[in-house]
C-alpha cells in the first residue's frame, strides 16, 4: 500500500492522536487541514524509504543532478525528470542517506533488525472499548533469535545521554509503541516486543538501539486509552473544545 493510500484510511493514527493531548481543537485542525511537508520531513521520508524499502526506492524517486537549465542539455534533462512523475532527491541528500544506510549496516543489531521481517505493513483495527477505528504502519515486524519484535526507525539530533529519551517524551514515542503493539495484537493476534533504532542525522550518523521494557509500552497504553477516549467523546458530542484550563501565574 502506498503512503498516500494509507493516509486516506479513515482511522486514528498516532501522529494525529498526539495532537489531542493539547486539545480536541488541535486534533480536529490537524486531521482536516493538509500540511505542506517541510524539507526536513521530505528528507526523513526519503531516508526511511531508502533504508527500509531499498528494492522500491527508485520506483518513487529520481535523482536530481546539478543542472544548468540554461543549456539545451540541462533543459532536456529537467524535462525528463518532470515527465517521470517521481519525487526528486538531490545528489547531496542521496549521499547523506547512503552514508546513513552504511552506518546502520555496520551496526550488528540494527542490521539484523532491519534485514529480516516485513516492512511498512499497514494495520487496521477497531478499539474494543470505544469502537473507534485505528491504524498504524510499523517500519519492521520481525523475528530475532526466536523473539517477535516491532521495530521503528527514527532519525534524531543525538543519541548521547538522555537526548533520545527527551525526544520520546516530546514526540509521543511511548504512545507510538503502545499503538503499534495494540495494532499487531488486534490484527495479527500476536504479542511482540518493541524497539527503536535511533540514528543521528549528522556525521558519523551514529546508531543506537533502544529495546523498550514493558513499563514503557504500558505508559504509552495509558496515554492511548486517555486520548482515544477523548476522541470518542468529541465525536459523540460533536464538540471540539480548545484549551480548557485557566492558568494562574505566580506572584
Image: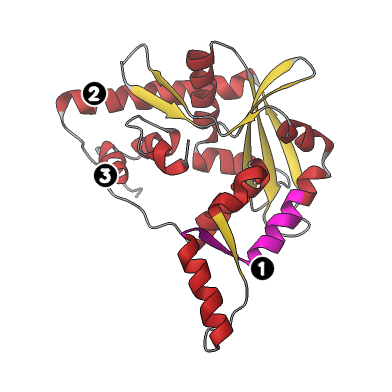
Q: Magenta residues?
A: 85-101
Q: Which residue matches tag 1?
A: 92
Query: Where is residue 116 shown, x and y percent of the image?
Result: 72, 29
Above or below residue 231? Residue 94 is: below
Q: Which residue matches tag 2?
A: 233
Local crowd at mark 3 within 10 Å, few (<14), some, or many (≥20)?
few
Q: Which residue matches tag 3?
A: 32
Query: For numbered disc 1, what is the local secondary structure?
Result: helix
The residue positioned farthest toward the bottom in the image shown: 70
Q: Choose mark 3 or mark 2, whichever is in front.
A: 3
Q: Residue at x 69, y 47 (%)?
A: 199
Horizontal side of residue 94 vs 15, given as left or right: right
The overriding secondary structure of the stretch rendered in magenta is helix
Above or below residue 37? Residue 105 is: above
Residue 29 placement: quadrant? top left
Q: In front here: 96 or 208?
A: 96
Amino acid at each position: 500500500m502506498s503512503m498516500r493510500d494509507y493516509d486516506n484510511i479513515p482511522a486514528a493514527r498516532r501522529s494525529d492522536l498526539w495532537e489531542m493531548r493539547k486539545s480536541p481543537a488541535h486534533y480536529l485542525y490537524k486531521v482536516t487541514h493538509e500540511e505542506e511537508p517541510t524539507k526536513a520531513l521530505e528528507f526523513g521520508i526519503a531516508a526511511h524509504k531508502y533504508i527500509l524499502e531499498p528494492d522500491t526506492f527508485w520506483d518513487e524517486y529520481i535523482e536530481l543532478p546539478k543542472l544548468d537549465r540554461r543549456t539545451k542539455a540541462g533543459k532536456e534533462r529537467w524535462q525528463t525528470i518532470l515527465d517521470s512523475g517521481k519525487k526528486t532527491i538531490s545528489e547531496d541528500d542521496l549521499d547523506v542517506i547512503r552514508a546513513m544506510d552504511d552506518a546502520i549496516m555496520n551496526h550488528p543489531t540494527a542490521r539484523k533488525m532491519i534485514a529480516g521481517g516485513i516492512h511498512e505493513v499497514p494495520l487496521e483495527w477497531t478499539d474494543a472499548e470505544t469502537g473507534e477505528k485505528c491504524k498504524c504502519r510499523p517500519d519492521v515486524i520481525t523475528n530475532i533469535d526466536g523473539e517477535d519484535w516491532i521495530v521503528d526507525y527514527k532519525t534524531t539530533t543525538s543519541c548521547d545521554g538522555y537526548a533520545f529519551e527527551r525526544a520520546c517524551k516530546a514526540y509521543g514515542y511511548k504512545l507510538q509503541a503502545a499503538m503499534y503493539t495494540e495494532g499487531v495484537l488486534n490484527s495479527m493476534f500476536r504479542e511482540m516486543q518493541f524497539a527503536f533504532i535511533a540514528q543521528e542525522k549528522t556525521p558519523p550518523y551514529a546508531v543506537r538501539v533502544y529495546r523498550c521494557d514493558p513499563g514503557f509500552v504500558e505508559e504509552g497504553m495509558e496515554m492511548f486509552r486517555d486520548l482515544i477516549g477523548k476522541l470518542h467523546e468529541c465525536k459523540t458530542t460533536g464538540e471540539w473544545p480548545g484549551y480548557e484550563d485557566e492558568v494562574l501565574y505566580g506572584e
